Image (spheres, rainbow, N blue to C red):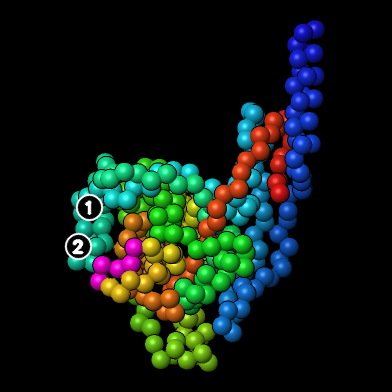
Amino acid sequence: MFSKAWLIIVATLGIGALAAVDVRFHPMHRATGKRSATPRLNGMPGPTQLQAPATIAPAPRIVAAISLSCSSDMVEVTGDYCPDPEEICEEYISERRDRCERFRTTERCIGKPEPKNYCIDRFEYPNELGRWPLVAVTWDDAQELCSKEGKRLCTEEEWTLACEGPERKPYPFGYTRDRTACNFDKPYIMPDNFAFDDPHTRAAEIARVNQSEPSGSRARCVSDYGVYDLTGNVDEWVFNGHGSPQGPEFRSGLKGGYWGPVRNRCRPMTTDHNQWHRGYQIGLRCCSDVRGTVPVTPIAGVRIAELI
């Protein structure tokens, strides 16, 4: 008798908790086959790609706090950023080019860790599973695109923490370089800079040299925080608050490398390109500040597809 009464009370509280917030339930989406084009930027449309079907995670079985901190296309990152980790390369591909095959699996943080809490796009812009990332954007373009979505460019520190994860791995997938995990180490194709600089031939030249892949194509190219394609695929603009040791001190920085044989890991940043530099391999990813959380007691069998 006691157990039945207890179950009724728990069920009532659960329903009341869900009613207190605006929780919307949707049936499982199906692929429509409808093409969706990347927004035009500087007169050049991006590639098109069939939209991938959305997925709905199974309902948790315990009392939890459903995050309202980030929009549904972003990942919340909470952790400590190390300003100067001790990374020791035990086997180089090229020491001169700072390309490491295998790192020591133990590391320590030199200096005081900095706590961070923010939101970051799950994929490279336009931040959709199965879409090719937009390329050939300047740092100023990237700022504008993020701002239109109510977001901003990630800082160098935010991008790095999302990539390294809580264990501060040099690659999002671990300590050993693996060209099958992420899209990098593809053969270099010599670009035609004259064709790229000419707006009339730029799109054709990008198509010739572009070796990027649709976002989320490689299931192992994901950090411990759940952020995809951070290393390789396309370079990503970030806000550089530290300038360049070679000078001049640009606010623009590039993280992650691209599909070619470059450093392609979490920590390095390219700092010698100004805000109006445009590269055939350069894209972006956005960040935003967090908002808050609402406690919810889920009901067995109910799937929460979207919370606004």
In which quadrant is the N terminus drawn? Answer: top right
Circle 1: is it few (<14), some (14-19), or many (20+) Cα within 10 Å? some
Residue 2 versus residue 152 in the image, above or below: above
Circle 2: is it few (<14), some (14-19), or many (20+) Cα within 10 Å? few
Which percent across, then down, holds residue 87? 25, 50
> Which one is earlier in the sequence, the residue at label 2 or at label 1?
1
Do we see residue 289 in this rendering? yes
How far apart, in angstroms, are the residues tagged by discs 2 and 1? 9 Å
Q: In the image, 191: left or right of 296? A: left
| Type of amino acid under label 2 | Glu
Which percent across, then down, holds residue 220? 45, 51
Helix or strand or loop: what does disc 2 sit on? loop
Q: What residue is rendered at 69% in x and 34% in y?
A: 296
Q: What residue is rendered at 68% in x and 70% in y?
A: 35
Which percent across, then down, holds residue 122? 54, 55
Q: In the image, 84: left or right of 144? A: left
- The stretch of residues the image draws in magenta is 242-246
Is residue 244 part of the magenta span, yes or no? yes
Pointer 2 with pointer 1, Cβ within 8 A:
yes
Q: In the image, 71: left or right of 140? A: right
Q: Which residue is mark 1?
A: 89
Q: In the image, 79: left or right of 132? A: left
- Residue nearest the viewer, comparing 49 with 199: 199
Q: Which residue is mark 2?
A: 95
Q: What residue is rendered at 61% in x and 73% in y?
A: 38
